[in-house]
Image (tube, rainbow, N blue to C red):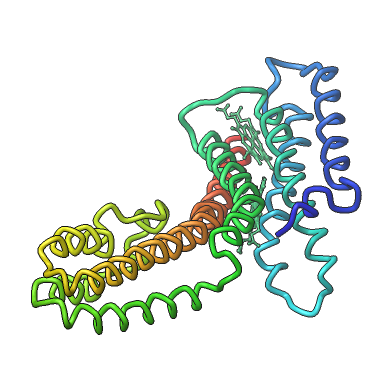
Amino acid sequence: MHESILAFRGFKYLKLSALMVAVTAIVYAVHQPTVGPPNGGTALGYALGTLGLGLIIWLAWFGVRKRRYGLGKMLLEDWLSAHVYLGLGLIVVATLHTGFQFGWNVHTLAYVLMILVIASGAFGVFAYLRYPRLMTENRRGATQRELLTQIAELDVKAREISAGLGDDIHGEVMRAQEKLALGGPARRQLSGRDPNCPATAALKRVGDLSLGLPVTDAEKGRALIALLARKVELVERVRRDLGFKAMMDVWLFVHVPLTFGLLASLTAHVVSVFFYW
Ligand code: HEM
Ligand code: HEM
């Protein structure tokens, strides 16, 4: 996704959503309920509830729509731009539907789920706008596969050099290579770093051990440390890359399942209000 999604067709969908919000707010302001305070049960309440439900079904339908191929790129961008702006406008429509009446009930549960779906969507837009640029900068023209290949090449060289520098140093290099894990648990991936990185630890320990090397091996020791330092730098870049990728994916784990929760609780809400009518 690109900034163009927000500015798509000269902000057409922002304008459409702003119009929807403005009309809704004006009607709410002038509407006088026949009995009681404004709430979901007035004529306007029903109208806004129906509009809100319609919007939610349409927004959820995007999950089906985006998986249909052969429909021209423009159409999908139209959908996404409209999805974002009408999804944000829904906050006003649904809130005015409730007449600001909230309680510990299934109606408010639906409302809270809706807010969480919208908030996660807003984070998604933020992530899609922010992280691709950071990823490009971080990779500096290389692909993730190329970075991994460079790390593997450094490993081969480090094994060769360290083999001539005694068991302690060689052992450190070998253990660090075996223990290195990229990826791992979700929380670690999202952070984009590993505080217990074996490559960083090996760099420090080999640095200390190399102080005890005979003068004749000092040159090799320095070459090995340079290799290990380069590897740490590459490993950190791969971790950051995985971290950015994870940030671009993580919000969908909220957005999509809670959409189903929202649809279920809304069904309960609508059925229950008609049941007690
Ligand atoms: C066809 C769609 C809808 C209909 C017919 C409908 C109907 C109603 C009715 C009759 C009430 C008043 C209930 C009462 O006073 O006891 C109400 C309240 C409410 N509705 Fe809806 N609604 C719809 C859609 C929605 C949507 C989309 C949301 C938000 C996600 C929502 C959230 C609420 C909330 C939070 C209340 C206030 C509950 C309270 O007083 O504690 N409704 N709705
Ligand atoms: C109650 C309101 C909303 C519902 C029910 C909803 C539902 C969905 C669904 C079902 C998808 C398809 C996800 C998939 O299958 O991969 C989706 C995608 C998306 N939604 Fe929402 N959404 C809502 C509001 C929003 C809002 C307000 C925003 C932004 C401010 C937003 C941003 C996005 C984005 C960026 C995608 C595209 C994900 C992709 O294609 O990678 N959504 N939404």
Residue at the spot x=31%, y=83% of the render?
156
Quadrant assignment, res 160: bottom left
Which residue does the image show at 39% across and 58% down from the upper left?
A: 189
Q: Which percent across, then down, holds residue 37?
A: 68, 16
Report x, y in % for residue 146.
Answer: 50, 77
Q: Quadrant of the C terminus?
A: top right
Up/down of 129 relative to 103, above or below: below
Among the 4 quarters of the image, the one containing residue 27:
top right
In this orientation, which residue lies closer to the viewer: 234 or 98? Answer: 234
Q: Residue at x 81, y 16 (%)?
A: 32
Q: In screen coordinates, is 240 left or right of 85? A: left
- Which residue is depicted at the point 43% across and 76% down? 148
For the N terminus, the quadrant is bottom right
Query: 188 or 80, which lies in front?
Result: 188
Position of residue 15 measured from the top left corner of the image (x, y, whole percent): 88, 40
129 shown above or below 228? above
- Residue 95, image x, y percentages: 67, 30
User: In the rendered image of this protein, does residue 104 appear above or below residue 200?
Assistant: above
